[in-house]
Amino acid sequence: MRAFPSLAMILSLLLCTVVCPAHAEGDLTGLATDHVVSFPYVVTGPAGERFVETVLTVSNPAAEQLYILISLSPALGPFVVGRSMELAAFESRQIVFHSANTLVTGSLLLEGKRPFAADAHIVIKASESSSSVISQVALPGSTPTNRVAFPVWIRSALADNTSFALATFGTLPVGAYYKASLYDTSGQLVRETRMATLREVMFVTELFPDLPDDFHSGTVLVDTVSSVDQAMVFSLIVLYTAGDKLFTASPADMERPGLFGMYLQGPDYDNQVQALQAQYHFEVTRHTAGYPAVTIRSTREVARVMAKDPRVKSLSLNVIIQIPPAG
């Protein structure tokens, strides 16, 4: 991999640093209602002669209080996994993740019962105590999924190289893994590999180190491979280097249907399951007659609509994904 100048060299250092644990522990709730924002890569600390911070801004757009659950890698910031933050009506709050002595990275997940806004920036400063900002890199938030695609540019007019950060927010079934497939601009498969861990931070040229010299652009597809159905538990951010410039992008969500846990309002649970299934065309994978809990296979788009149905008490991703469907 070529040596990038200036700010891109700082990026290279950030990407090669030792990362924090692969994901935050704890169950996820509310993903189906789309009140979740994840940031798979946050960083703070000294980087060469520079200093890096991640600044997170969270806003409550409603005229009532909002509680947000924050889960993140333990080495970052004053929060611990499962810490709640209370925002007053229309309040915005800024959190600066700061590590004075060691460069550390991690991932961040925010969950709320209602919609909220969140954005993050990597701020590169001349030094820890300096107020002079050399550059800021926007970190687009995303909703966890199970399959994404993103464009790749290498030694091209648009970018020198493409990097990405992937983080897992939850538990995959035993034996499950992520597969990365690289396609050229004609749609032909160029390379395919299994990712080593559930958290990756690297350049595409590190993921596929033996690319031919004439490969300059294409698409990477990251997919979840498992013998049983998947929840949507990983997020990915893409970052491109071009000379001394950095720019980020969100991947295209190519989600496969996953398993969702649904709880119904009473009392006639069995008939409600049948009526909902006829209306929304999901597949029931687990349900015991007379009980309100149902496990369904669906897309997030359908789940978002179902979560607002008055017959549905709650709908979220469910750890029952580790149990193979009946039949």
Image (spheres, rainbow, N blue to C red):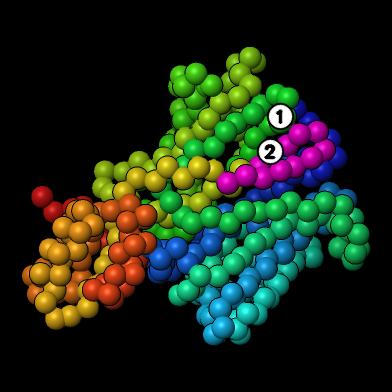
Spatial CA distance of label 1 from label 2 is 9 Å
- From the viewer's side, name the closer residue of 227 and 54: 54
Q: Is residue 193 shown left or right of residue 86? A: left
Label number found at residue 158 = 1
Would residue 254 be seen by someone viewing this image from the given angle?
yes
Residue 71 placed where, x, y %?
Answer: 53, 68
Which type of secondary structure does the marked residue at label 1 adopt?
loop
Residue type highlighted by circle 1: Leu
Q: Earlier in the sequence, mark 1 or mark 2?
A: 1
Relative to 218, is 254 above or below?
below
* Prevalent SS, magenta region: strand
Residue type highlighted by circle 2: Tyr
Q: Quadrant of the N terminus?
A: top right
Residue 150 sits in quarter? top right
- Badge 1 local density, few (<14 within 10 Å), some, or many (20+)? some
Relative to 225, is 291 above or below?
below
The magenta-colored residue range is 239-250
- From the viewer's side, name the closer residue of 301 and 218: 301
Residue 272 placed where, x, y %?
Answer: 15, 70
Seen from this angle, which residue lies furthest left?
289
Q: Which residue is mark 2?
A: 240
Q: Going 78% across and 31% down the picture, which residue do you hit?
A: 3
Q: Going 64% across and 29% down the picture, which residue do you hit?
A: 153
Relative to 71, is 148 above or below?
above
Residue 308 sits in quarter? bottom left
